[in-house]
Image (spheres, grey):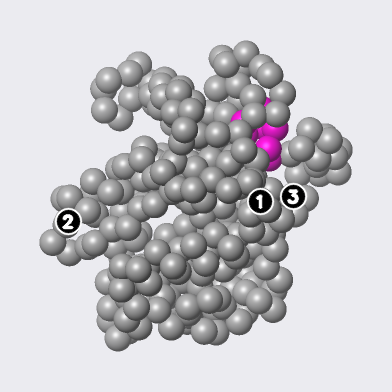
């Protein structure tokens, strides 16, 4: 799960496709990271490595302990946690999909804009400013939408025909999440945000990860219009994991941070193609 995201509706479309339409082929596990939804919300310093340990504890409880059993998909902060998870239990990873994420946050947007973002607490204020500085809800929703999604997707008719546009649907979903005062809390959000901001994996650590998991089992996905974690982060991640040694890198032109919503059908196809690929490796 990404920063401040609840398992539903965050992965609702994927849960329906893989868990229901193709339930005879796949078993899905969706869960709220610590600090969100139905998970505990301790007030402490969160780290992506501790959140990966939470994941290991959960899958151990489910007795998903066989070798090469897990197809791990992580988006944004979830992709950071997935990196930590793969370093902890590489022998259990069948495939690893890292989408819209980074090994570490670096300045890719120029000195002055980077300085401005840092002065504004960067990703924290621009993603969920109301958690730090009171703002009009309309202004806040507009800011969140434009940083998470491409403008063309936001302006397109709602995929399900229930709202005028995709952007209107997202606004309604975001407002519903804010009304869940038990599941979405300021304390939990800030703790998660600090974990994402402090995440750091060196080139040496990424090489170790790729060596142990296997580069043919790893894919990196990123949209060129991602304003949350810019596409150079994906390029760096792919390069340091070993793009030239068999890793799959997919850069999606004109799409934003949430590829699994903006390009749902393509996303599902990419995941299924990876599953088929690694099955041939066994």
**Between tags 3 and 2, which lies in front?**
2
The quarter of the picture where the C terminus appears is bottom left
Eyeballing the image, is 171 above or below 123?
Answer: above
State the CA–CA distance, disc 1 to disc 2.
Answer: 39 Å
State the CA–CA distance, disc 1 to disc 3.
Answer: 30 Å
Position of 22 compared to 62: left or right? left
Q: Taking the image as drawn, is residue 60 in sight? A: yes
Eyeballing the image, is 189 above or below 88?
Answer: above
Is 275 covered by the magenta stretch?
Answer: no
Q: Residue at x 28, y 49 (%)?
A: 15
- Neighbour class for label 3 at 10 Å: few (<14), some, many (≥20)? few
Residue 44: which numbered mark, if any?
Answer: 1
**Between tags 1 and 3, which lies in front?**
1
Position of 121 compared to 171: left or right? right
Q: Residue at x 64, y 24 (%)?
A: 130
Position of 153 compared to 230: left or right? left
Q: Residue at x 31, y 68 (%)?
A: 62
- Neighbour class for label 1 at 10 Å: few (<14), some, many (≥20)? few
Label 2 residue SS: loop
For the magenta stretch, what is the residue range?
A: 123-129
Tell me residue 135's x, y (percent).
Answer: 66, 17
Residue 193, by quadrant, is top right
* Lower position in the chain sequence, tag 3 or tag 2: 2
State the CA–CA distance, disc 3 to disc 2.
Answer: 39 Å
**Between tags 1 and 2, which lies in front?**
1
Determine whether label 1 and label 2 are within 8 Å by CB: no
Q: Which residue is mark 3?
A: 108
Eyeballing the image, is 94 above or below 29?
Answer: below
Chief secondary structure of the magenta portion: helix
Q: Which residue is mark 2?
A: 22
Tell me residue 114's x, y (percent).
Answer: 80, 41
């Amino acid at each position: 799960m990404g920063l401040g995201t609840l398992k539903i509706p965050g992965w609702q479309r994927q849960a329906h496709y893989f868990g229901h339409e193709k339930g005879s082929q796949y078993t899905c596990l969706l869960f709220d990271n610590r600090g969100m939804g139905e998970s505990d919300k301790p007030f402490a310093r969160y780290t992506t490595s501790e959140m990966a340990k939470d994941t290991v504890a959960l899958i151990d409880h489910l007795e998903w302990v066989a070798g090469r059993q897990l197809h791990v998909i992580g988006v944004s902060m979830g992709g950071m946690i997935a990196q930590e998870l793969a370093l902890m239990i590489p022998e259990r990873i069948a495939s690893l999909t890292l989408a819209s994420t980074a090994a570490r946050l670096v300045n890719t947007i120029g000195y002055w804009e980077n300085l401005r973002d840092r002065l504004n607490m960067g990703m924290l204020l621009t993603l969920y400013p109301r958690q730090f500085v009171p703002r009009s809800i309309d202004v806040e929703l507009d800011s969140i939408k434009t940083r998470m999604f491409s403008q063309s997707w936001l302006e397109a008719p709602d995929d399900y025909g229930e709202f005028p546009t995709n952007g209107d649907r997202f606004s309604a979903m975001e407002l519903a999440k804010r009304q869940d005062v038990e599941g979405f809390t300021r304390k939990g959000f800030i703790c998660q945000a600090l974990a994402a901001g402090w995440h750091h994996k060196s080139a040496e650590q990424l090489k170790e990860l790729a060596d142990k998991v296997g580069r043919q089992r790893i894919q990196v996905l990123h949209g060129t219009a991602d304003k949350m974690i810019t596409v150079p982060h994906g390029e760096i991640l792919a390069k340091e994991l070993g793009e030239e040694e068999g890793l799959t890198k997919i850069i999606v032109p004109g799409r934003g941070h949430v590829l699994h919503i903006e390009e749902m059908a393509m996303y599902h196809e990419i995941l299924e193609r990876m599953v088929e690929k690694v099955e041939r490796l066994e």
